[in-house]
Image (cartoon, rainbow, N blue to C red):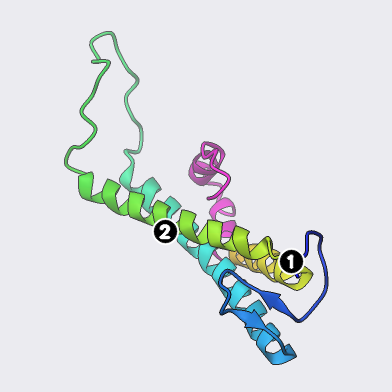
């Protein structure tokens, strides 16, 4: 039966019909996998933001009257941009899979994912704000995509 509200049960189907749990050990393993995928999601996001910060120029010059309106975007750094786009795509796919797992409406899955995202953020991304460098704050606030 498909639940449409949060419920507690060790019987849950996650993402695929073949990934269903019928026992407590299988349920605990599914929760551990959800937790680890959520931590990995935060690790990839941290890596992507660091690469993006390292690849961007430190102080871009302000535009002047002679600056063309249309600038060729693919320059010498097209490989870096392609890598960043691939990381963004992978991270988005993992984010949507996490969202679909939460949509099983199982409270244990929900808590495992939220705890994994929290631990992953604490381990991989909270140090960005501890040294007084505001570069990562700008990178996070400029990102309006809910999936990353």
Residue 147: in magenta span:
yes
Please give the name of the residue rendered at 21% of the width and 44% of the height, measured from the top-left corner.
77
In the picture provided, is 21 more to the left or to the right than 69?
right
Q: How many marks?
A: 2
Farthest residue, direction left: 76
**Image height check: is 84 above or below 145?**
below
Q: Mark 2 points at which residue?
A: 90
User: How would you rate the neighbour count of disc 2 (Cα within 10 Å): few for under 14, some for 14-19, many for 20 or more?
Assistant: some
Q: What element carries label 1?
A: loop
Residue 116 point in image, percent of width and height: 64, 68
Please give the name of the residue rendered at 34% of the width and 51% of the height, measured from the top-left corner.
84
Farthest residue, direction front: 1
- Taking depth in this image into account, of 127 and 108 the one nearest to the observer is 108
Residue 11: in magenta span:
no
**Image height check: is 110 above or below 147?**
below
Using the numbered discs, state the Cα–Cα distance from disc 1 to disc 2 in whole angstroms: 29 Å
Farthest residue, direction top: 65
Please give the name of the residue rendered at 75% of the width and 73% of the height, measured from the top-left corner.
108
Residue numbers of the magenta segment: 124-148
Q: Mark 1 points at which residue?
A: 2
- Taking depth in this image into account, of 66 and 8 the one nearest to the observer is 8
**Image height check: is 62 above or below 110?**
above
In the picture provided, is 16 more to the left or to the right than 51?
right
User: How would you rate the neighbour count of disc 1 (Cα within 10 Å): few for under 14, some for 14-19, many for 20 or more?
Assistant: few
């Amino acid at each position: 039966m498909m639940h449409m509200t949060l419920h507690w049960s060790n019987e849950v189907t996650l993402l695929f019909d073949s990934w269903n749990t019928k026992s407590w050990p299988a349920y605990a393993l599914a929760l551990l996998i959800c937790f680890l995928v959520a931590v990995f999601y935060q690790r990839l996001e941290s890596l992507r933001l660091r690469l993006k910060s390292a690849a961007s120029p430190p102080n871009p010059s302000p535009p002047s009257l002679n600056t063309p309106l249309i600038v060729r975007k693919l320059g010498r750094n097209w490989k870096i941009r392609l890598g960043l786009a691939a990381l963004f795509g992978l991270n988005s796919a993992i984010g949507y899979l996490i969202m679909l797992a939460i949509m099983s409406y199982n409270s244990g899955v929900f808590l495992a994912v939220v705890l994994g995202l929290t631990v992953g953020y604490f381990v991989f991304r909270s140090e960005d704000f501890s040294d007084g460098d505001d570069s990562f704050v700008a990178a996070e606030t400029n990102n309006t995509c809910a999936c990353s």
